[in-house]
Amino acid sequence: MSNIFSENNQIGRVSSFEELVQTDFKGEKNALCWDRNLEGDFKEIVTQLQLKEDVTEIYPEDLLALQLSEKGNVARAIILNDFQLLSDYGASPTLNLLKCYERDDVFDFIATDVYSYHVDRSPIATDTFLCTYYGAASEIISNAQAQQKILIPEIRAKLKELYDGPADEFDNFLRDNYFDLHYEVQSNAVPIVLGLGHLCRLAVDHPEQQVLPCIHRAPKENEGEYRLLLIC
């Protein structure tokens, strides 16, 4: 794994929320991260929260109801402030307590769940924001080190076996079922772990985007440990 701020052309390092949202993606740079070394006890918050489903949405009122130590209060204030910053910006942040995501086991030749390297797509100009406060952190990969799964001959041939419509609408079938969003990485690829506490902005595939969308995935969770993730 590569360090988030090691020498690379993919991630831009910023020092404030304003810089994070105002800096343009350029060239190979399709990820921006607000470099932060957060104080506070985020583990205390995770320990007190109640997991109701494998992915449980946590609301600000849930955080406010917790009885926390001084360090826990610091962590809570950081999360609530991030929530407010993103909301004021016009985003719709969601805080999730995660045991695991649902795995895609429909096809044995192509995975389309969030553990597969993928890009996000939107019909309007937007970006993906995320921050891992506790647990395993999300990963990204250089576009040059990955290939769309639908372009791999063996996978494409099996997808054609699934499709029973007109030949000239096959690409629409791939897009409508989100197969085109998923990527296979090269054997020598070096993923970049986004780390804990950094609020990151990733480029999304949309009509006005000037760079390639950022390829990313959810990490394998650490044994016996939940994740606390803010995402929108």
Image (cartoon, grey):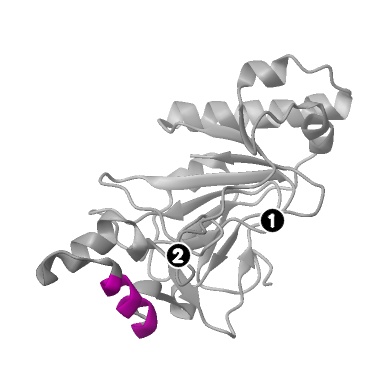
Relative height, residue 205 to residue 85 (above, below): below
Name the amino acid, label 2. Phe
* Quadrant including the N terminus: bottom right
Q: Tell me where residue 176 appears, x and y as whole percent.
A: 26, 54
Is 152 left, or right, of 198 in this rendering?
left
| Disc 2: CA contacts within 10 A as few (<14), some (14-19) or many (>=20) | few
| Disc 1: CA contacts within 10 A as few (<14), some (14-19) or many (>=20) | many
Relative height, residue 138 to residue 197 (above, below): below
To which residue does mark 1 refer?
195
Q: Main secondary structure of the magenta part?
A: helix
Q: Are marks 1 and 2 in contact (CB under 8 Å)?
A: no
Task: Give SS at disc 1.
Answer: loop
Please give the name of the residue rendered at 61% of the width and 71% of the height, measured from the top-left corner.
191
To which residue does mark 2 refer?
107
Is 139 left, or right, of 19 in this rendering?
right
Which stretch did the figure color magenta? 153-161
Q: Tell me where residue 90 appears, x and y as whole percent.
A: 40, 30
Give the spatial CA distance, label 1 vs label 2: 31 Å
